[in-house]
Amino acid sequence: MTTLPREDFNQFVSLLSSLEAFRSETSRACLVDEVLAGLTRENDIRGLLDLSGSPRPAAVSLIRAFMNFGQVEEGQDLLTLLATTLLDGYVFDPEPADF
């Protein structure tokens, strides 16, 4: 199990639920597909997820499920994989701006 201080948890929920890629259940599933790609326990993890509803409750549910699951392999935390995926392609614009 992974733990986050309450403030960090709330900030993570706010960030995730505000992303365009988290607005619909279909786009949430695509994000989760990217996070879970290639993991040996992918199906076990998917069975814990509920991505339905509006963005904020879905974000709470996803983050809690990832926190409860903990590590997918030694030293590989599921919540860290989510954060890395978000930073690599969702939070920051992957295309450099032309000035």
Image (cartoon, grey):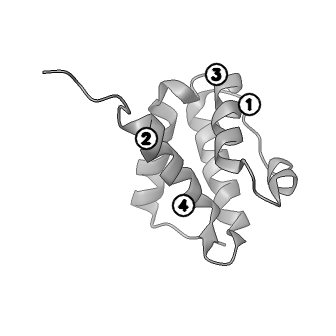
Picture quadrant of residue 99 = top left
Instruction: Answer with mark 2 or mark 1, whichever residue precedes in sequence.
Output: 2
Mark 3, other Cα within 10 Å: few <14 / some 14–19 / many ≥20: some
Which residue is labeled 1 in the image?
A: 52
In the drawing, does residue 21 fall left or right of residue 98?
right
The Cα–Cα distance between marks 2 and 1, rounded to whole angstroms, is: 18 Å
Q: Quick check: can you spot residue 31? A: yes
> Residue at coordinates 64% horizontally, 47% vertically from top-left?
35
Residue contact at pointers 4 and 2, CB within 8 angstroms: no
Instruction: Answer with mark 4 or mark 3, whichever residue precedes in sequence.
Output: 3
Badge 4 marks a residue whose secondary structure is: helix
Instruction: Answer with mark 3 or mark 2, whichever residue precedes in sequence.
Output: 2
The Cα–Cα distance between marks 3 and 2, rounded to whole angstroms, is: 15 Å
Instruction: Answer with mark 1 or mark 4, whichever residue precedes in sequence.
Output: 1
Q: Position of residue 51 (x, y in %)?
A: 72, 36
In the drawing, does residue 31 fall left or right of residue 69?
left
Which residue is labeled 3 in the image?
A: 24
> Residue at coordinates 50% horizontally, 39% vertically from top-left?
16
Q: Position of residue 74 (x, y in %)?
A: 68, 78
The image's mark for residue 80 is: 4
Q: Residue furthest left?
A: 99
**Amino acid residing under circle 3:** Ser
Which residue is labeled 2 in the image?
A: 15
> Residue at coordinates 49% horizontally, 43% vertically from top-left?
86
Front in this rendered view, residue 6 or 12: 12
In the drawing, does residue 81 fall left or right of residue 89?
right
